[in-house]
Image: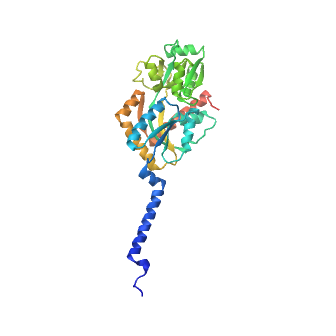
Amino acid sequence: MTTGFSKKNTPGASRRLALAAACAALSLALGSPAAHADAAYPAKPVKFITNFPAGGPLDILGRALGDVLQKELRQPFVVDNRPGAGGNIGADLVAKSAADGYTVLLSIDSTFTINPHLYASMPFAARDLKPLMIFSSSGLGFGVGPAAKAKTLPEFIAQARTEAATFSSAGNGSPGHLAAGIFSTATGAKITHVPYKGNAPAVMALLGGEVQAGILATPGLLPQVQAGKLRALAVTGRQRSPLLPEVPTVGELGLKDLEFEVLYLAMVPAATPEPVVQALRQSLQKALALPEVKARLASLDMVALGETGAPAAERLAANQARYGRIVKATGMKVD
């Protein structure tokens, strides 16, 4: 006996087919990386890879930001220090990590603006990483050890023209390394560069008398200068530091070529889904606006920037072009 309509056209069958199709579409959507990241990120702890040692400005800032983001995104943000080769080791690790937002690089710009000109070969390509944000900047401080005879930069220059001075830096390719080369070229001072694995050990070498001078990130020098254990002869910013108001700028001393900034930035693997990128950017922007983070930056003699997109790209490109010219002019290189 026939019923007047086939089984495939029954209302119940049609509903079951529609429900099955909807479930299949939802399964595909949830299975896609972008949709999953958008709905659930972060679903587990996030690792902040810092490519310089513990105790330096980047490490201190990374831990402060990690504490804020942990509260904002309700997952741990763990700092993992991977120093070496002017930041190349940590940057390479992140460039080759899974592009899922769970491995984030915190770096200074020199890894991307100086190292490509200075190193004979790089372990990663710039296209392997995507900038999230330039979140702050600081200057450099020209510091001398407790045994230094020179009380001013002109006195130090006069002395170093006849007697070579040893300079510590945060490593080959660091801003201090390049700044020392500029200083020597501009003044005729004789220097011997001694690289360390980060700003903190470079400051300790200066403090311990292993070297005579250093042009180092101001946040690392600052506590020792304020304690009277090191002497700051100049700062590389265009304006005097509010925390060292008595210390002149290099521009005031006729060394405009030595003006320098250190940019602190965050990057992720280039293929990281855009929803994850946006979540991290928005959380970083919120963190930089918090009074406690602003106070932390100020205590480190840092300026909050929060730059993304075209402004960030233009700033990095300008630095890379300038540093390329300097490396070529000074003949600096690292094998």
| Quadrant (top left/top right/bottom left/bottom right) for the N terminus | bottom left
Where's residue 323, x and y in %?
55, 32
Is residue 136 at least partly visible in the picture? no
Where's residue 211, x and y in %?
56, 19
Image quadrant of residue 6?
bottom left
Q: Residue furthest top?
A: 149
250 w.r.t. 135: above or below: above
Residue pictured at 60% horizontal, 28% vertical: 329
Q: Nearer the viewer, residue 67 or 320?
A: 67
Q: Residue furthest left?
A: 291
| Quadrant (top left/top right/bottom left/bottom right) for the C terminus | top right
Q: Is residue 127 left or right of residue 137?
A: right
Way the structure is coloured: rainbow
Residue pictured at 51% horizontal, 19% vertical: 207
185 w.r.t. 78: above or below: above
- The mark tally for this picture is 0
Where's residue 228, x and y in %?
45, 16
Q: Is residue 104 left or right of residue 285?
A: right
68 w.r.t. 182: above or below: below
Where's residue 90, x and y in %?
55, 37
Residue pictured at 51% horizontal, 37% vertical: 80
Q: Nearer the viewer, residue 152 or 19?
A: 19
Is residue 327 at least partly visible in the picture? yes
Image quadrant of residue 240?
top left
Q: Residue furthest front?
A: 1
